[in-house]
Image: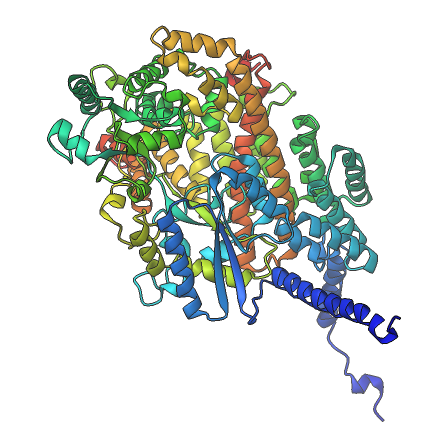
Amino acid sequence: MNTPATMHPRQPNWLGCVRFVVGFCGALIVFNPGNSADVAEESPGWELLAQYRFKEALLAFEQNSATGVDSKRSIALGEALSRLVSPSYNEADLPAIVSELEQIWQSNSRDKAGLWAGYYLGRIRQNHANAKADYDAALTWYERVATAGGDDLMAQTARLKAVGLLLFAPLDAVLTSEERFQQAQDLVANISEPYLQMNALLVLGNGMFYRDAAPDRVLPSLESAWRLGVTDPTARAQILIQIGNLATKVGKPHLAADCYQQFLDEFPREKRNQMVREQLALLPTLPADE
Amino acid sequence: MSNPSRSKWPWFRFTILFVVFAAALGFVVHRSITGTSTDQRTVLHVGHFIPEDAGTVALEEIARDYNRLHPNVIVKFQRIPRSIYYQWFRTQLVSDNPPDIIQYNLQQDVSLRQLISRHFLPLNELVNQPNPYNEGTALAGVPLVKTYVDELSGRVAYFPEMGTYFGLPYSARTLRIVYNRDLMKEITGDPDYTPKTWDEFVALCERVKTYAAENEIKLFPIAASQFGVFLVSNESFINVTQKLAIRHDYNLDFDANYPLGTTLGYLNRNWDLTTPEIRAGFKLYRQIGSFMQPGFLQFSDSDVLFQFLQGRALMMIAASPALNDVADFDLGVFRIPGIPRDDPEYGDYVLGPYSEAAHSTTHPFGIPRSTPHREIAQDFLLFLTSQRINQQYALATDQVPVIRGVSSGPLAKKFAPDPDGYPYGLQPRGLGRASSQMTFARSIYLLFRPDGGIDAFIRNLEANQYREIVYRDAVVFSKNYQQNLRETDVALTGRYLSTDQADPNAKSEIARLTLRQTFFEMDALQTADVLSRQTPDGKTVPTPRQNDP
């Protein structure tokens, strides 16, 4: 008579181990607090926000709130953001919106909704027209999100925004330009998503320009940004000219020539062509750049 | 004696009348809401502000062509006079039933940008796809954006801060001197005389004055309004401030970033109204003013046009060859010559003639989001911007084409932007926003008065707290930046959470929009930083480098 054991012959121990590992990983995915599954994406409100249809988005989130579509945290986030940009918004609405975002953040600062909420608490400090911008408070919020989110895309976005504040904003914190550069470079080093890294390097390079850094300090940031791939035509034109001019100043005529030539090839009808042609003609003929 | 059966008639008649009235009312309301005509054809309403009759006639012909291709669609154009255009535009957009397509004119009105971004349909998908109406032409298979002569590089159809296209332009405008060929022949002996240098242009103006004096006639070199003075003079002003702009190009991109960069540069005291290059520009204003009809600051554009058409001025400035429609003499056209590098007086300030490559196509047609005929409206815009139809329009109106490969009439050819040349210099007239610009314009009379001059003009601007007004305008810039960043933030979040991040197209779109926001945010933060170092009365505290502890 077949026993259960003979019907299902004993499997080797390694298979059990594999099952355990798979099961454990599955459980981790389900219960991982940083997992994005808890921000549902079904509400049409998000798509309406993407289309700048803020009033309709608010209505959609209010309806979803009643019908139970999406998680409560996601809908609460959507409602708060829609109210922030709604045409009927006024300054008196802000404390309630901030309070809602703080609740989302405090109840779980490591899931997607929590990270978005923290990010917006920073954005409100930075970009709220009616209240005076508080760049130091915004920077603090970006640092909190960056710490809570680790490698999450939101945390990396928060680092990008912090780089901008460090290099351009009128912070109350007393920092030398050198300290600003160092802190910004540390943040950039912790951004791994290529498109965000490229943005951060551009901000770093232009921020160094703004704070009068020497050309040999600015050039590596813009070169690295370029290598990561810049597709936007306006940005490509600007960066090619900037790298060309920086390379000329630091004595890398071949790099300068390549950039100028690429600019002329890509943008045959551009208001800066004549300037670039002249710069190209002025370059000395030198041995290859080191 | 009353007849009971007859007494019912009035009631019956009124019932019939009421039913017929209600049916008619319902029918009319239904038609106006759905845009459906009596025979179930769709009526597409298009609002525009093209003032020339030739333009209206050409558009009507295009509408008929479209109807021949799509018998179920009737396109009805409505011309809106420019005098009421802005009120009309705003009213239509907030109404429930705007036209299906509206032509818009942005200039620098930031509030209009916000109105358009809220109420108009983004056209990114449309502009990145080939125009099917270009099948069989050299532009077949080419994305619509690439079929435009300027690839929609301006900031009118494309809103770089949002990475979004909201309209398809149908006009190209560059500034040219238009002149009366008969008069030119009388004065110079050559109806096609074209000054090649600034000095030759000035000499021509002097010659006209001499000719008028010798013949005792009322003839002036140039007819212009106050705005016209700015337009003629700016051509030389942006010449003599080119090297100044490059000296303050801190990020080495050869771009003065007008108007924000120039405004912040002024507030930062990189330059001021007494800087030699700026004074040189004012001197050129004064010189040009001496060639215009007396009292020119008081004239409207229509007064100026009338004076030119009456033969009381040899030249006037125009942005398109549309005058051809109304003049009963032959017109000639030339570009205002630039100041060369070897000019003995101004040469040290000059890079050379400026490039017109940034003169992008303008006056776009956009689609309000609330139209019930979104797809038909998009299809009609594709038809309108096809090579064949733009060719038809350009020839019928003698306007400058906006689509590649379209040929233009002889006059329109001279209005085609010349991309060769150098970047613009600085223009103090364009600092800040409307308040600064109005303050500047209100004081300009002092520059032209015989007892006035450059110093009187600058003193008057200072007495009117010009720097403080520019500061206040920059505060508005800053608020607008914040408003825009709030909206683009939320829109980006919406896009992020409503799309599948594993989809490379969705991710690449988010990357594109993030980059646009990054550039915009750098401008916003710089504005905030510069403002933080100003006091509202126009005093500047140390620059960021000096501010380092």
Looking at this view, is B87 or A285 the one in front? B87
Question: Which residue lies most toward the top here?
Answer: B451
Residue B402 falls left or right of residue A71? left
Q: Is residue B97 visible?
A: yes
Tell me which residue sits at (53%, 32%) in the image: B522
- Kindly give the residue lying farthest to the bottom in the view shown: A1
> Image check: B446 left or right of B40?
left
Instruction: Decide: is B430 above or below B103.
Output: above
Quick one: quadrant of the C terminus of chain B?
A: top right
Q: Which residue is at the front of the view, B328 or B9?
A: B9
Q: Position of residue B5 (x, y in %)?
A: 85, 76
Q: Position of residue B28 (x, y in %)?
A: 64, 62
Give the residue displayed 56% in from the left and 62% down from the top.
B373
Q: Quadrant of the N terminus of chain B?
A: bottom right
User: Toward the viewer: A210 or B121?
Assistant: B121
* Along the viewing direction, whichever of A113 and B173 lies nearer the viewer: B173
Please identify the residue farthest to the left as the structure is shown: B189
List x then y, in percent, for residue A41.
70, 58
